[in-house]
Image (tube, coloured by chain):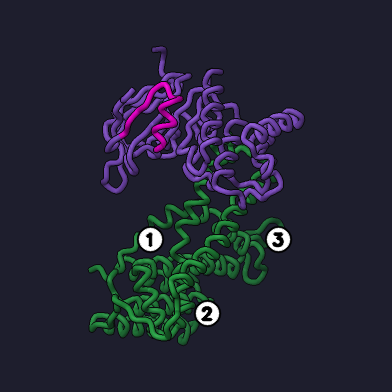
Chain colours: A purple, B green
Amino acid sequence: MNTPYIYLKNVCYSIKGTKIISGLNLSIGRSEFVALIGENGCGKTTLTKLLLGILKKDFGEVKIDGKYIEKYKLHEIGNKIGYVFQNPSYQIFAPTILEELSFAMKYKGNDEEIIKLRTEDIIDKFSLGDARDVTTYNLSQGEKRRLAIGCMMMNESEFIILDEPTLGLDAELKINLMEYLCDINKQGVGIIIVSHDKEIVSKYAHRIILMKDGRTNETA
Amino acid sequence: MKLHNTDPRVKFLIVALITSIGVISGNVSLLFVNFLVGLIYAKLFDVKFFRIIKRLKKALYFLLFIIIIQSIFTVQGTPLLKLYDVALITDVGLKRGIGYLFRVMIILLSGAIISTSNTADVLKGFSKLGMPYELAFTTSMGVRFLPILMEEIESTYTAIQLRGINIKKLRFVKRVQMTTYLFMPIIYSTIVRSKKISESVETRGFRVGDKRTSYRDIKFIRRDYMICIITLLIFVGMIYFFELRGDYYEGFISSWIHKIR
């Protein structure tokens, strides 16, 4: 395997003396599609937050694209890796869908015409057309999740991490989302998907990593 | 000696006294001593005050800015710092600024002292003092949700940065715009949450009966009476020395400011 995009060596993380992640080793390639599964509270979300530098590890090494995580600022990580929170309400802050989707591109000074085209494309792909005129705060959980994923896609990240993206979606939307993820993965975007939905992720992911008591165990 | 399990009503008394002096008195020396007394109580109640200060570091810079502004815009008193003929800082302005700093510190101390009791005890304390239960309940609920609001603001801030935006490098106007994005969802979620909580407590029969029984109770013990008496004596002494005897005990901060002059 080439240099891994994500590399963790002997990573430990604890909260008030309780070990959440203990001696975790993991490496994920640049365009791999990896599913992270495990029981509630086994440390899946904590692991994703350690990868992004939202949480600081107690011990060990974390490298993103060959560089130590400590060398990055949060916005630099944001430019490389897209992240969908477990609770999408936390990452939706603009009052309208259009404003929410175009937020990052506008702040980065992109051309209005390109922003409009991409926004419409995402609205169409994630079936958000019906909710176009609804205040984002009033969207259903499923719509909020789709919007959060859509916002991340607007960023055109080289790697994406999705924390429980299938929660609150019906069967058809789940399949649509997974097929969309497969498509972008074929274009070279690496994916980590954290999920309880073992059945659906096992159909699409290249590799399934089972987490237990803060450690990983490759299952397929 | 740690007193963190003291009856919450004792803490209410201490907080009421230090905040009253903080609001009423304009005497900087009294405010300083009041702050020190509050700090001693905080230590006894096992408050990690300096850890709170560390967390509020950014807000403290803003506080410092307000103190300087307050000093600059006070024209009364003898000038300590002049720019040509314009008095930038006067002794009265400096005293006011320092007084303002102590007042804010006293408010922080008060909140920290009350938070050493658990919410159920604070609620019980309020209702035993005669506050209507509904009011005590809503107050304690509000306090309980403050950390959650802080967490939500932090998450939104992280989410904005994870979209690849360097907030620190934004221009002032865009940064101000950003605060709207930070606070709008919080305000909205707070309104929705309060509505949901009210529906939830109603469906669980909140205040159906007139009398509410409680498994957990709070009782005044001898130690609590002792603390109350000592506290009252300390505050009466402070007011006597610093306020009633006026100029005679003007206090060392005032004399220090005079020495600078």
Q: Residue at x 52, y 63 (%)?
A: B196
- The number of numbered discs placed on residues in the rendered structure image is 3
Residue annotated with mark 2: B24
Magenta highlight on residue A210: yes
Check if mark 1 and mark 3 are on a common chain.
Answer: yes
Residue annotated with mark 3: B86
**Residue depth check, mark 1 versus mark 3: number of the one nearer the observer:** 1
Q: Chain of mark 1?
A: B
The residue closer to the viewer here, B90 or A154, is A154
Secondary structure at badge 1 equals: helix
Measured as percent of width and height from the top left, residue B107 is found at 47, 68
- Identify which amino acid the numbered label 2 is placed on: Ile
- Are there few (<14), some (14-19), or many (20+) residues within 10 Å of tag 2? few
- Identify which amino acid the numbered label 3 is placed on: Val
Magenta highlight on residue A148: no
Q: Residue at x 39, y 12 (%)?
A: A1
Magenta-highlighted residues: A196-211
The residue closer to the viewer here, A133 or B222, is A133
Q: Whole-Å distance between the Cαs marked 1 and 3? A: 39 Å
Q: Chain of mark 2?
A: B
Residue annotated with mark 1: B49
Asked which quadrant contains residue B127, the reply is: bottom left
Asked which quadrant contains residue A195, the reply is: top left
Measured as percent of width and height from the top left, residue B5 is found at 27, 71
- Are there few (<14), some (14-19), or many (20+) residues within 10 Å of tag 1? some
